């Protein structure tokens, strides 16, 4: 049994334990320990990705299955396939970049670094867990560090935003706990093993109960995504969180929700999901359009990016809902796979692009202008060439410019979804138009026009900030031009997930 | 009829220990009363061994079939003795450098209280049950009022006494109903008669009995004493009331209901009470400003959660789905978590002279260890993994669903969300609020550090490696059928 997944999962916790023995005032040591831990974790995850057998990306690899609580049939079951492994690498990469970016944090640095490492374990655990109880534990574990990250290092309304985030997501988690128990008690033999339950389809013959369980899972995942109308925690949390917190929130934590939809809800309760897919798709399209329109109205750059997340996650959910509606219907199998591929690529693309955007907001806000008002800037293009270049690249990628990562994702989603929900897909395209408009308008307002004399002395990005951003910019271009290795691996995983639906 | 003294070794040990402490208190100089507590701790540690050994003895009834020796009772002995040890440690911190004339008596009375809870959880005869119940009550009244110079403590003692006297009377009246129609006070004999009673008559008897147990458990609507008594009583004593006496009363309740009364109407009544207790406890806990009052309402809410385990009367091959098993696991987890939380309240209350939650501001800087431990306890009380009460709630909600009480699980979950708000109010104060200007560092005593370390490690270990605890609970959840 390979232990590489456990290594990725527990290395950050090991780092936290080391940090506990570093004196509070040895700031440099604290930073180096954290950097080394996150670098090592990232290295191992990249190693796993290289060792990963891409020809069999649809099956779980590096599987670890050990007893954990045999008295109640709970196992320590980890595995990675073409869906989870890219998300794990995304997580470890972004955590590493967050540590690099947060080099200058001086308020309680030891707690700060420890919380980011704990958060990493929580997030990676959700992507790797193949046992429901294990999944749930990591799902909850990822909440607590974020509460403190927002609450201690956040902006002026941090306390409100932190508890709001926690309360919203906890409602969802507990609804999921009920759903898990409902599924468990209807399985024969009773088990918490995700793969076994998917094979068993315990609620296949009991649609009313399956729908109750569906809403339990749905509430949890939809709050996390967040889907309209459960998104109201997101602007508060994003705006108040410190830069690195916003990055992980947008790039990874939101993906836990969409991952749950694809990994659990779709294959576990396919009938119920197909039954309710149209409602989910409608909410997704409302979210996509609403997010774009509200983003356009924002003058706070961070809020603008936050609402653009609501918009982008709407596309993901449209793809998932279309796949759920099409799954098992002859003639639409291809559409289902395409839409789901698009949704998964969009998860990764949104992680890379929006992660970069939040870093970029931080670069200008945290250490330079101390304002995020879109209208306060102007003409920065001449003053900050590197910053301008990367920001424009990220914004163009976000609005879906061809040859950048976002385009691949959105194209696949719309291609698949159009065959299932033509009218809704056309409506969602309105969102795309608005997105293009507000990002171009934002670029214009910040970088074009005459230079606002207040910013005449603003320095460009320093080395540390470049280290945090150049890798993300490179990924946007590489996977925009040559998405094939990524899409191939994802495709096999999606075919396997949809293939399990009869 | 033989007196099987070996079967009650733990009880004999506890009785001798308590009497020893009374004498030791007489011969110990004021200011050195800690010795009494240390002897108590060591004695209780010794008493753990024979209690654990009872797990491996065959289940039987002793003393003219009035007293049960079974794994169920053994489990509650362990819980009672463990909470006794932890409470003694907390009491040592409470009286550190602030000794009163009554310090030694408090230590010996705590051991008496442990003895009474042990008796209560093993009694299978109505008379013995009532005597144990009164024994526990009398010791509790005295301990609640043991800060004689403190008006709030006096109020706590008197209030507890009046409520308790009324509740005991109601319970005794209920017992007379059962005795009157069956002519026996033995639960196992009672069982054969009760099945023929009219539901209305039986319901009345059960409700009256419930008044007594509900009072001890702090179940709505018998809960009104709880906040005032917790606030006024010495903090370590409040800790024992919230854990030890609650556990023993639940044990007795489970035994009476499962052995003597067939699961008919009372299931619905108790399920309703569980839902009301959770909801009322949590909602009223929200605006509380005082940590002890907050913990009091929290303990009312937790009584509601625990009652889920009583009403989910359903067999299950594994522990997931077994009501009693879930209840026992929950009690075990709650014992460590809640005594730990009261332990921090003791330390802070002693250091700051205040129990206001607002005064916890900046505690993460002033007393990092206490603050971290408190954060763990608050996480556990909310039910966030990887802490002990997460698995407690997991098992309880599982039992509810398995028992066809999905609605009760939903009520429990909504209440959990509400509870996050006030538990994290404490965390918010400790970690997110700055300490007041010029606030000094708060030093915990050595004993208090041990207490916090033990309770915190237990809270986390039960949450991460629940397997051995679940096995123990599984063995203990079989109530002897004789």
Image: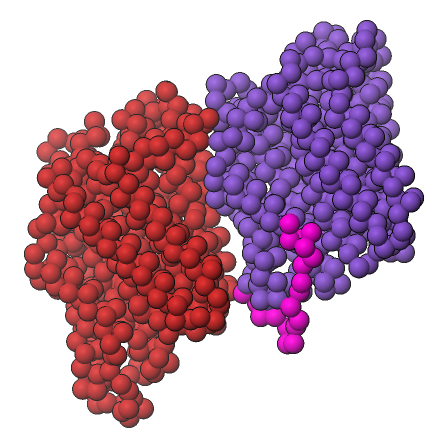
Q: Position of residue B65 (x, y in %)?
A: 77, 11
Q: Quadrant of the N terminus of chain A?
A: top left
Can residue A303 be seen by looking at this rendering? no
Instruction: Please name whichever residue, B21 or B128, is drawn nearer the observer in this view of the structure.
Output: B21
Colour scheme of the picture: by chain
Left-right relation of A124 to A429: right
- Residue A85 lies, with reference to residue B433, above or below; the image says above
Instruction: Residue A73: name its quadrant.
Output: top left
Q: Residue sitting at 41 percent across and 36 percent down?
A: A133
Q: Which chain is red?
A: A
Q: Residue sitting at 76 percent across and 31 percent down?
A: B117
Instruction: Please name whichever residue, A259 or B51, is drawn nearer the observer in this view of the structure.
Output: B51
User: Chain B shown in which color?
Assistant: purple
- The number of numbered badges drawn on the structure is 0
Instruction: Residue A438: name its quadrant.
Output: bottom left
Please check the rendered image and state whether residue B440 is part of the magenta-colored stretch, yes or no: yes
Left-right relation of B134 to A494: right
Please check the rendered image and state whether residue B198 is part of the magenta-colored stretch, yes or no: no
- Residue A299 lies, with reference to residue B271, above or below; the image says below
- Residue A313 lies, with reference to residue B469, above or below; the image says below
Q: Position of residue B56 (x, y in %)?
A: 61, 18
Left-right relation of B268 to A52: right
Q: Residue sitting at 10 percent across and 49 percent down?
A: A485
Q: Position of residue B98 (x, y in %)?
A: 82, 58
Q: Which residues are magenta?
A: B432-450
- Residue A318 lies, with reference to residue B77, above or below; the image says below
Q: Position of residue A188 (x, y in %)?
A: 37, 20
Instruction: Residue B345: name its quadrant.
Output: bottom right
Q: Residue sitting at 30 percent across and 49 percent down?
A: A8
Can residue B467 be seen by looking at this rendering? yes
Q: Which secondary structure is most common in the magenta stretch?
A: loop
């Amino acid at each position: 049994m390979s232990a590489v997944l456990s290594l990725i999962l527990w290395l950050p916790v090991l780092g936290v334990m080391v940090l506990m023995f570093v004196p509070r005032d040895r700031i440099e040591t604290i930073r180096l320990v954290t950097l080394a831990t996150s670098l090592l974790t990232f290295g191992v995850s990249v190693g796993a990705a290289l060792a990963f057998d891409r020809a069999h990306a649809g099956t779980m690899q590096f599987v670890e299955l050990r007893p954990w609580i045999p008295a109640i049939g709970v196992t320590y079951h980890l595995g990675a396939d073409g869906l989870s492994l890219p998300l794990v690498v995304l997580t470890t990469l972004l955590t590493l970049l967050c540590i690099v970016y947060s080099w200058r944090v001086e308020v309680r640095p030891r707690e700060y670094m420890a919380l980011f490492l704990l958060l990493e374990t929580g997030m990676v655990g959700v992507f790797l867990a193949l046992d429901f109880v294990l999944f749930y534990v990591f799902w909850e574990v990822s909440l607590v560090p974020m509460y403190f990250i927002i609450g201690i290092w956040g902006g002026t309304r941090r306390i409100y935003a932190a508890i709001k985030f926690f309360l919203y997501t906890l409602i969802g988690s507990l609804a999921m706990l009920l759903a898990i128990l409902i599924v468990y008690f209807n399985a024969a033999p009773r088990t918490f093993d995700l793969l076994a339950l998917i094979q068993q389809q315990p609620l296949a013959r009991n649609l009313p109960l399956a729908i109750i369980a569906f809403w339990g899972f749905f509430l949890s995942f939809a709050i996390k995504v967040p889907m309209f109308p459960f998104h109201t925690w997101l602007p508060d949390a994003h705006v108040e969180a410190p830069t690195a917190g916003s990055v992980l929130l947008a790039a990874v934590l939101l993906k836990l929700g969409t991952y749950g939809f694809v990994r659990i809800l779709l294959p576990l309760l396919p009938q119920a999901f197909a039954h309710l897919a149209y409602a989910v798709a409608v909410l997704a399209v409302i979210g996509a359009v609403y997010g774009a329109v509200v983003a356009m109205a924002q003058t706070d750059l961070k809020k603008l990016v936050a609402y653009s997340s609501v918009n982008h996650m709407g596309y993901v959910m449209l793809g998932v809902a279309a796949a759920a509606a099409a799954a098992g219907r002859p003639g639409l199998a291809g559409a289902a796979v395409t839409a789901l591929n698009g949704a998964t690529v969009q998860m990764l693309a949104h992680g890379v692009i929006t992660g970069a955007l939040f870093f970029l907001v931080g670069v200008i806000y945290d250490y330079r202008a101390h304002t995020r008002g879109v209208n306060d800037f102007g003409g920065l293009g001449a003053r900050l060439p590197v910053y301008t270049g990367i920001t424009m690249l990220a914004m163009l990628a976000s609005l879906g410019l061809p040859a950048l990562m976002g385009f691949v994702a959105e194209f696949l989603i719309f291609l698949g979804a159009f065959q299932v929900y033509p009218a809704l897909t056309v409506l969602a395209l309105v969102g795309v138009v608005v997105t293009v408009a507000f990002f171009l308008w934002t670029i214009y307002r910040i970088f074009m026009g005459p230079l606002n004399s207040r910013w005449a002395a603003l320095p460009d990005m320093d080395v540390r900030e470049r280290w945090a951003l150049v890798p993300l910019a490179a990924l946007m271009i590489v996977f925009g031009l040559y998405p094939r290795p990524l899409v191939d691996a994802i495709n096999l995983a999606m075919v396997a997930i949809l293939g399990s639906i009869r | 009829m033989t007196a099987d003294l070996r079967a009650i070794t733990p009880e004999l040990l506890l009785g001798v220990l308590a009497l020893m402490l009374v004498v030791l208190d007489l011969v110990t100089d004021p200011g050195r009363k800690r010795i009494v507590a240390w002897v108590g701790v060591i004695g209780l540690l010794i008493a753990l061994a024979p209690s654990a050994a009872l797990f491996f003895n065959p289940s039987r009834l002793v003393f003219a079939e009035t007293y049960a020796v079974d794994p169920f009772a053994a489990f509650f002995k362990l819980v009672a003795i463990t909470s006794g040890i932890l409470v003694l440690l907390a009491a040592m911190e409470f009286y550190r450098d602030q000794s009163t004339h009554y310090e030694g008596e408090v230590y010996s009375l705590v051991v008496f209280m442990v003895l009474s809870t042990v008796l209560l959880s093993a009694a299978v005869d109505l008379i013995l049950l009532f005597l144990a119940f009164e024994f526990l009550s009398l010791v509790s009244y005295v301990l609640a009022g043991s800060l004689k110079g403190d008006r709030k403590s006096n109020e706590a003692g008197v209030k507890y006494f009046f409520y308790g006297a009324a509740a005991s009377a109601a319970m005794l009246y209920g017992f007379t109903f059962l005795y009157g129609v069956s002519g026996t006070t033995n639960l196992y004999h009672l069982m054969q008669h009760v099945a023929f009673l009219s539901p209305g008559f039986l319901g009345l008897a059960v409700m009256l009995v419930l008044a007594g147990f509900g009072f001890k458990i702090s179940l709505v609507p018998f809960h009104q004493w709880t906040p005032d008594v917790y606030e006024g009583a010495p903090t370590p004593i409040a800790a024992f009331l919230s854990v030890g006496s609650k556990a023993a009363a639940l044990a007795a309740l489970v035994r009476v209901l499962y052995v003597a009364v067939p699961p008919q109407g009372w299931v619905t009544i108790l399920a309703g009470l569980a839902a009301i207790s959770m909801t009322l406890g949590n909602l009223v806990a929200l605006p509380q400003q005082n940590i002890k009052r907050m913990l009091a309402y929290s303990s009312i809410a937790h009584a509601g959660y625990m009652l889920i385990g009583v009403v989910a009367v359903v067999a299950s091959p594994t522990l997931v789905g077994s009501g009693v098993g879930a209840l026992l696991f929950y009690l075990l987890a709650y014992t460590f978590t809640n005594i730990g939380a009261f332990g921090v309240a003791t330390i802070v209350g002693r250091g700051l002279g205040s129990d206001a939650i607002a005064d916890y501001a900046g505690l993460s800087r002033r007393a990092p260890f206490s603050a971290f431990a408190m954060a763990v306890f608050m996480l556990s009380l909310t039910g966030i993994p990887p802490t002990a009460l997460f698995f407690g709630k997991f098992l309880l909600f599982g039992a509810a669903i398995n028992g066809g009480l999905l609605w009760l699980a939903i009520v429990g979950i909504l209440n959990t969300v509400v509870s996050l708000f006030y538990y994290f109010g404490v965390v918010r104060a400790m970690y997110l609020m700055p300490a007041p200007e010029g606030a000094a560092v708060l030093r915990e005593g050595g004993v208090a550090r041990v207490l916090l370390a033990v309770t915190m490690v237990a809270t986390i270990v039960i949450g991460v490696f629940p397997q051995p605890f679940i096995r123990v609970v599984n063995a203990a959840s079989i109530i002897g059928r004789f």
